[in-house]
Image (cartoon, grey):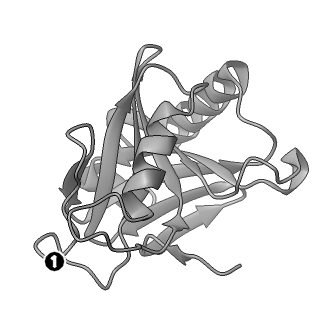
Amino acid sequence: MGYETARYDVLYQENNFEIRRYHKHILAQTNEQSLSGSGGFNDVFNYITRNNQNQTKIAMTTPVFNDIVDEKAVTTAFVIPSQYTYETAPKPRSSTIKLVEVKEHVVAVVRFSQTVTAKKLQQKQELLMEWLKKHHVMAIGNFKLARYNPPFIPGFLKRNEIIIEVDVVSLENIL
């Protein structure tokens, strides 16, 4: 199955690490209590499967993004297909779903497989921060988790990423 993916350009790559420039995009986003729940995913999934003001079916995209503020503050978001603008995207019927316009930005990424666990997230966040420190690149904001596969895909085939925005000025050391 070929899903549309949030558009980005790879500016630098080293093993499983990348510096990317994400293009402007729109998210359908909701709040969650933790990454282990499926309530937020189900809310956003319902939005794209006609639970919106137009009752329009919206194509599934990748990745599913989770903002990781802390262990009890998480968001789940689907990327709205590029055919829509913020103004033309179907408006949510549920007050728990918000459309968010994300401006172009630059991020650091570490890619990994396997099923996502709290321990794996912590390890990958630390690994990404070590890599950024080694290259003198400054991180900005909170980590995001990007998941590209449905839950039934075997762990060794899954594509996951930890992402954090970076200060563009600090990239002169790496680009």
Judge whether 55 appears above or below 160 on screen: below
Q: Which residue is mark 1?
A: 88
Q: Nearer the viewer, residue 90 or 110?
A: 90
Residue with the most extreme left position: 87
Marker count (numbered): 1
Determine whether the residue tagged by mark 1 lies in a helix, strand or loop. Answer: loop
Judge whether 59 appears above or below 119 on screen: below
Seen at 68% across and 25% down, the residue is: 123
Q: Is residue 136 visible?
A: no
Seen at 41% across and 63% down, the residue is: 48
Q: Image quarter for residue 88?
A: bottom left
Q: Position of residue 11 (x, y in %)?
A: 46, 71
Q: Position of residue 92 (x, y in %)?
A: 23, 55
| Quarter of the N terminus within the rendering | bottom right
Residue with the most extreme bottom position: 83
Seen at 55% across and 27% down, the residue is: 35
Q: Amino acid at mark 1?
A: Thr
Seen at 66% across and 20% down, the residue is: 118
In the image, is 22 to the left or to the right of 146?
Answer: left
Number of residues whose C-alpha sits closer than 10 Å to that of mark 1, classed few (under 14), some (14–19) or many (20 or more):
few
Q: Nearer the viewer, residue 72 or 89?
A: 89
Q: Image quarter for residue 124?
A: top right
Q: Is residue 9 visible?
A: yes
In the image, is 105 to the left or to the right of 126?
Answer: left
Judge whether 105 appears above or below 130 on screen: below
